[in-house]
Amino acid sequence: MPPSKEDNAFLLVIEQHKGIIYKIANSYCKNTEDRKDLIQEIVYQLWRSFGGYNDQYKYSTWLYRIALNVAISFYRKDSKRAGRTSGLTADIIIAAEEEEDTGPQLKLLQRFISELPELDRAIMILYLEEKSYREIAEILGLTETNIATKINRIKNKLKRKFSTIHN
Amino acid sequence: MEDNALKEMWANYDKKLERSLALNHRIITEIQTQKARTALRPLKTVKIIAVILGILWALLLSVLVCFALSAMTYYRHFFVISAVAIIITTVAAIVAYIRQVVLIQQIDNSMHVVEVQRKLAALQSSTINIARILFLSAPFYTTFYINKSMFEHGTIGLWVLQLTVTIVFTIISVWLYRNIRLENADKPWFKFIFGSNEWTSVIKAMNFLKEIEAYEKE
């Protein structure tokens, strides 16, 4: 059966936002096998929700909400996930080896982000993605003032961590 | 480390990913055609087994109650009342559990992140209520076997032991029913009861719920 318009539209959205999906999965899951499962779960949940997409929001807002919700829930699940892969052996998003060569500073930033509590981590990812306070508030469901306070606190925390390493 | 430096670093990461990431269209097509559905959402076998065993247990007790009622004597009241109480608590626990799993599946992930996570954590934490209900049935496991022979030949020692066990079970189960709650999650007795792996995700959810509530108030 040839792919429908909806199938192609979905594929296009995933193609355009594959970087976001990968970065979120990478921030909540360091283990390669678990990350593969998480990406599959995110794409599956996006597909489930795609038919009911509300065009009142931007595609990115919709996608961030689902990806973050799935990632946070996945992260909180039983930590004993060894051997529990989804049954699909291939990766949805394939990263070339070049991705591993990210440089020491970025590796540190990724490590510090992955050490943040789940919700702080979501805020920091959105902040680094250059989302406005309004959009971050829209994605998370908090007030803009609350977001501003939290971003300041998280940035200070990260700066302290960087300075500890450099000293 | 300045803000701009952090953002610049992240933007470079973005550029690198742009060059290095590729989509596996075949897997996405499989997801779109639902082929991957069962593989992606495996309901834990242990949960299915627990529900099946619970239903079988309630059915077995129901059959035994029917037999007992068909030839009812005074002494069989102990068995009938105990078994009915156990059936009621077992069915209540199964219904609460299935309802909770269904509600978790129905949560809309495209809603606000904090709201979805609070709902999920609250639902997962409510698993603890199922344990509370089941603890309430504990005293009835100490009374269902009381029979005519115990009344006719039982010594005082036997009855003292029987009464002690039943009273202790009743006090403990009522106490647990009243005290198994979120506020007590840090107490040693709570950790002792719910320290096994099966409860890890529930305890995590309870702690996360506390964090979310504090987070919104900040």
Image (tube, rainbow, N blue to C red):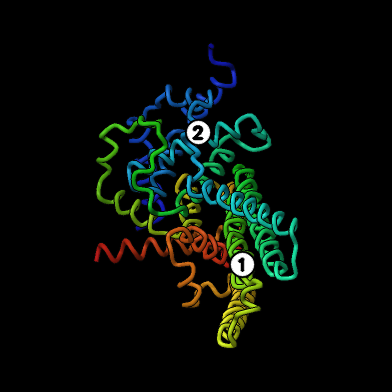
User: Where is mark 2, residue-wise?
Assistant: B38
Is residue B18 shown left or right of residue B60?
A: left
Is residue A128 shown left or right of residue B15?
A: right
Rendered location of residue B207, percent (x, y): 52, 65
Rendered location of residue B72, percent (x, y): 75, 62
* Relative to B147, residue B162 above or below: below
Q: In which quarter of the image is the C terminus of chain B?
A: bottom right
Specify the quadrant of the image occupied by residue A91.
Answer: top left
* Relative to A43, residue A117 above or below: below
Instruction: Give the camera-side residue of B137 and B111.
Output: B137
**Residue in the picture at 59% in, 49% down:** B56
Q: In which quarter of the image is the N terminus of chain B?
A: bottom left
Is residue A48 shown left or right of residue A107?
A: right
Instruction: Give the camera-side residue of A57 and A36.
Output: A36
Disc number placed over residue B132 in the picture, else none: 1
**Residue in the picture at 72% in, 54% down:** B66
Is residue A6 shown left or right of residue A87?
A: right
Rendered location of residue B128, percent (x, y): 58, 63
Please indicate, yes or no, whether residue B181 appears anywhere in the rendered image: no
Instruction: Give the camera-side residue of B91 and B175.
Output: B91
Q: How crowded is mark 2: few (under 14 residues within 10 Å), some or many (20 or more)?
A: few
Which mark lies nearer to you, 2 or 1?
1
* Type of the residue with mark 1: Arg
Q: What chain letter is assigned to the residue under label 1?
A: B
Q: Helix, strand, or loop for circle 1? A: helix
Q: Helix, strand, or loop for circle 2? A: helix
* Relative to A139, residue B211 above or below: below
